[in-house]
């Protein structure tokens, strides 16, 4: 079984764990050739999304129900988030290295994301929504928080069309390791 210390060490080396559902959820370390990041200084949102954020339709919370966020992220037909990873990341949350950013609506978890924080780097792991735009609002909340705390790096691992709309870019792993080193100093 993986330990929290091994996971934290992995992040400092530019790798992250994922379970392989087709292999009985065996956990492997991943180091993509190209890494997805969202540059905080060029984070962008649409005018409509900014209006929704400003309306404060959602109750935004940090770590109100970390495990529920992880389980919601894992609730897909195929997922790399195994029970072992849920246990490890919940332990990381308890020691202050993993965080969930949550959007609640009418007392129910509507969307959110979770990830790991070390130094001035945040390693985004996964996001979900049960209500339209809830995960986007949670991402905006994360970025707002990271900017206030002077973070330097928002790692999103892989680029998706969903993340491209916020300014996510791919950079070579070698460039990522330089940014990571600077953010961990």
Image: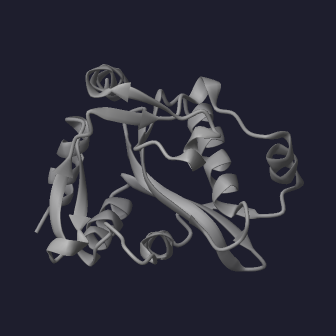
Q: Can residue 98 be seen in this view?
A: yes
Which x, y percent locates residue 161? 56, 46
Q: Residue at position x 17%, y 63% from top?
A: 27
Residue occupying the point 36% across, 64% down: 94
Reply above or below: 48 against 63.
above
Question: From the viewer's perspective, is 76 left or right of 61?
Answer: left
Q: Can residue 100 be seen in this view?
A: no
The foreground one among 94 and 68 is: 68
Front-most of residues 7 and 30: 30
Q: Which residue is drawn at 42% across and 37% down?
A: 36
Compared across the picture, whether 119 is left or right of 87 comes to: right
Residue at the outermost left position: 1
User: Which quarter of the image is occupied by the N terminus?
Assistant: bottom left
- Tell me which corner region of the image, top left, top right, bottom left or bottom right, holds residue 173: top left
Residue 110 image offset from top left, x and y in percent: 67, 72
**For this rendering, which residue is in front, 118 or 17?**
17
Relative image position of residue 47 (x, y in whole percent) = 85, 40
Q: Quadrant of the C terminus?
A: top left
């Amino acid at each position: 079984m993986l330990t929290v210390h091994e996971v934290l060490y992995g992040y400092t080396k530019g790798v992250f764990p994922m379970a392989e559902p087709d292999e009985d959820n065996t956990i492997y370390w991943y180091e993509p050739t190209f890494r997805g990041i969202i540059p905080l200084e060029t984070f962008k949102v649409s005018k409509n999304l900014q209006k929704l954020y400003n309306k404060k339709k959602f109750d935004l919370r940090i770590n109100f129900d970390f495990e529920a966020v992880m389980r919601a992220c894992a609730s897909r037909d195929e997922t790399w988030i195994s029970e072992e990873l849920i246990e490890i990341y919940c332990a990381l949350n308890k020691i202050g290295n993993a965080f969930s950013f949550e959007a609640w609506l009418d007392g129910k978890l509507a969307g959110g994301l979770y990830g790991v924080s070390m130094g001035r780097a945040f390693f985004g792991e996964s996001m979900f929504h049960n209500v339209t735009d809830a995960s986007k609002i949670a991402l905006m909340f994360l970025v707002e928080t990271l900017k206030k705390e002077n973070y330097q790096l928002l790692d999103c691992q892989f680029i998706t069309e969903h993340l491209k709309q916020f300014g996510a870019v791919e950079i070579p792993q070698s460039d990522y390791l330089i940014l990571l080193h600077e953010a961990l100093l």
